[in-house]
DNA sequence: GGTAAATCGTCTTGTGGAGAGACAATCGTT
DNA sequence: AACGATTGTCTCTCCACAAGACGATTTACC
């Protein structure tokens, strides 16, 4: 179950490991958040609206990296289940602030627990410390992954081959 | 540019970081391997056939995690460009072994260099050591990510979502 | 030895999600 | 009050993906 890093096989490719991990996570996570209306998308919306200041659906969509048209469906599903509610912004009646309800907060707490179990199962051959490291490294990369190729002339050109 | 890990925001979710990193990588990598017929899929096939023993297309598809029908298209595109060739297996004439040509090996070498640059740009706010750590951790998780839920007796299996 | 079942690779077809565009409602500016 | 800009929703199209069918070939069984 070890990887030969000098052979240059398919395991050493980010283009193989990243989709593989993502596919495995999606498969498990979809079941873990099955109770959340809208599926994984609805879960993300629920996390954002409970941990951040209320903003417009458009800003929310841009932050979560999804299309604005899909945001409509996700909020529709959550609102139909009574987990969030749309409130017209008193300052700008075009925007609909999305607020979580008490049921939404409890649903999020339950889903979070189920998701943590799934994530632990996904990274089961990593130690607890390594899991934390992987989470932090991924989050830091994701922070700049959305920017479309900035011209960084000072990018270190050293060989990142393990 | 730092993450507040105690707030439980969206940045702390694997379900946010993983798709974000994967989307950023796909966007950049698609351009880096644009010269490879078949795109990213063709690149993966090229890596596999040059670093592993020749096997059937079906085994190759299962190893790369792609569908057998797509493997046909990928090999078709690579063969049309003269980068791989199908050889009938002398032991079993049903299977077609996929062998790389000299042009395929040089194309792979060039694409690998371009891909390493793209990957370095993606992880540009990580040190070289951290990049190596991330690669290894991802690869180790990916090794078991394909197995469908091996030993989690406390997870309810009653959710076959469509 | 002959026949039936199984396997590999290819082709055709259906399906689901994702994104672009249009449209009504609303705000800011002049 | 009039015009352009922005937000949220709806509709449409496109495309990647997978399931099934089919010919070619091998293996198992009688």
Image (spheres, coloured by chain):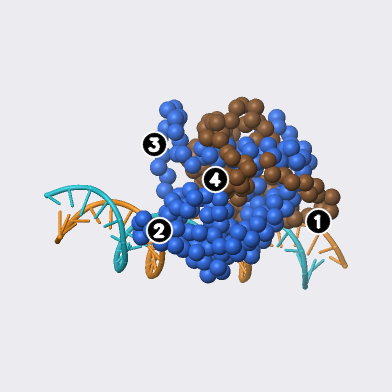
Chain colours: A brown, B blue, C orange, D cyan
Q: Where is residue D19 in the image (x, y as percent from the top left)?
A: 36, 55
Label 3: chain letter: B
Secondary element type, mark 4:
helix
User: Which residue, given by chain and number where applicable, does mark 4 sit on?
Assistant: A20
Left or right placement of residue A21 versus residue D28 in this view: right
Numbered mark located on residue B89 in the image: 2
- The reply to whether the C-beta atoms of the residues labelled 1 and 4 are less than 8 Å apart is no
User: From where the camera sits, is residue A60 visible?
Assistant: no
Q: Residue at x 45, y 35 (%)?
A: B149
User: What is the spatial separation of the Cα atoms under label 2 and label 3, in whole angstroms?
Assistant: 44 Å
Left or right placement of residue B53 versus residue D29 in this view: right
Q: Residue A67 or B148: which is nearer the viewer?
A: B148
Q: Where is residue B85 in the image (x, y as percent from the top left)?
A: 50, 64
In the depicted structure, whether residue A28 falls above or below residue B79? above
Label 2: chain letter: B
Front: mark 2 or 1 = 2
Numbered mark located on residue B158 in the image: 3
Label 4: chain letter: A
Same chain under badges 2 and 4? The reply is no
User: Which residue, given by chain and number where applicable, does mark 1 sit on?
Assistant: A151
Q: Which comes before the other along the chain, label 2 or label 3?
A: 2
Front: mark 1 or 3 = 1
Same chain under badges 2 and 1? The reply is no
Secondary element type, mark 1:
loop
Front: mark 2 or 3 = 2
Numbered mark located on residue A18 in the image: none
- The reply to whether the C-beta atoms of the residues labelled 2 and 3 are less than 8 Å apart is no
User: What is the spatial separation of the Cα atoms under label 2 and label 1, in whole angstroms?
Assistant: 48 Å
């Amino acid at each position: 179950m070890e990887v030969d890093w000098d052979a240059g096989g398919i395991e050493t490719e980010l283009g193989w490991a990243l989709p593989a991990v993502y596919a495995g996570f999606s498969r498990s996570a979809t079941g873990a958040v099955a109770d959340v209306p809208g599926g994984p998308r609805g879960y993300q919306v629920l996390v954002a609206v409970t941990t951040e200041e209320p903003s417009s659906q458009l800003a929310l969509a841009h932050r979560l990296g999804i299309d604005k048209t899909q945001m409509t469906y996700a909020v529709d599903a959550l609102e139909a289940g009574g987990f969030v509610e749309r409130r017209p912004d008193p300052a700008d009646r075009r925007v609909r602030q999305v607020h979580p309800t008490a049921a939404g907060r409890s649903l999020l707490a339950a889903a979070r627990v189920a998701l943590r179990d799934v994530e632990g199962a996904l990274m089961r051959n990593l130690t607890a410390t390594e899991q934390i490291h992987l989470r932090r490294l991924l989050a830091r990369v994701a922070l700049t992954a959305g920017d479309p190729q900035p011209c960084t002339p000072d990018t270190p050109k050293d060989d990142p081959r393990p």
